[in-house]
Image (tube, rainbow, N blue to C red):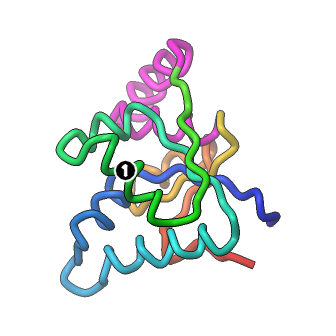
């Protein structure tokens, strides 16, 4: 892919990085850090939207922005529309998935971004957004 790759990070990926989380076997915080370093190296854009910032309310918008300012990564804030909310509500009801997961996938799709997640719910949303775990994203 080109140097203009775009990514939308699930809340859990941000938390992995902020909290340097591990799952007992894997260094999830390290995977998130390496992913962000690869984004920097390849001049990628990170798309962020209010639903993620809301879910990260314990950390806040300033922390996310400050974190990314430590990297040379373009941060783009996406607007969320009523149409996207309505579509997420319909999909979450039809597929019995969390509303926010459906909304995140729609935001990623509408912003031509790859959804970076390790949440199993997104396996049921691959028809909406291209998804992958941070350690599974291949950079050229």
Vertical order, 104 against 43 (above or below): above
| Above or below for 52 versus 25 | above
Residue ID at (66%, 60%): 44
Viewer can see residue 114: no
Q: Nearer the viewer, residue 33 or 24?
A: 33
Residue 139 horizontal/vertical position (percent): 68, 76
The residue sitting at the bottom extreme is: 25
Q: Which quarter of the picture shows residue 117?
A: bottom left
Residue shown at the point (30%, 84%) measured from the top left: 26
Q: Quadrant of the C terminus?
A: bottom right
| Residue ID at (53%, 17%) | 81
- Residues in magenta? 81-109
Q: Which x, y percent locates residue 23?
A: 22, 76
Judging by the rendered image, the residue that carries numbered circle 1 is: 64
Residue 140 drawn in magenta: no
Magenta highlight: main SS: helix
């Amino acid at each position: 892919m080109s140097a203009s790759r775009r990514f939308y990070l699930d809340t859990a990926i941000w938390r992995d990085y902020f909290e340097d989380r591990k799952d007992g076997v894997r260094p999830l915080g390290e995977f998130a850090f390496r992913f962000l370093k690869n984004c920097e190296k390849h001049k990628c854009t990170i798309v962020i939207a209010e639903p993620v910032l809301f879910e990260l309310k314990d950390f806040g918008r300033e922390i996310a922005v400050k974190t990314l300012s430590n990297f040379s990564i373009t941060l783009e804030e996406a607007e969320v529309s009523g149409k996207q909310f309505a579509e997420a509500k319909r999909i979450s009801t039809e597929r019995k998935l969390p509303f926010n997961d459906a909304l995140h996938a729609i935001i990623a799709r509408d912003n031509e971004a790859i959804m970076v997640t390790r949440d199993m719910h997104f396996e049921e949303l691959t028809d909406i957004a291209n998804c992958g775990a941070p350690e599974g994203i291949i950079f050229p």
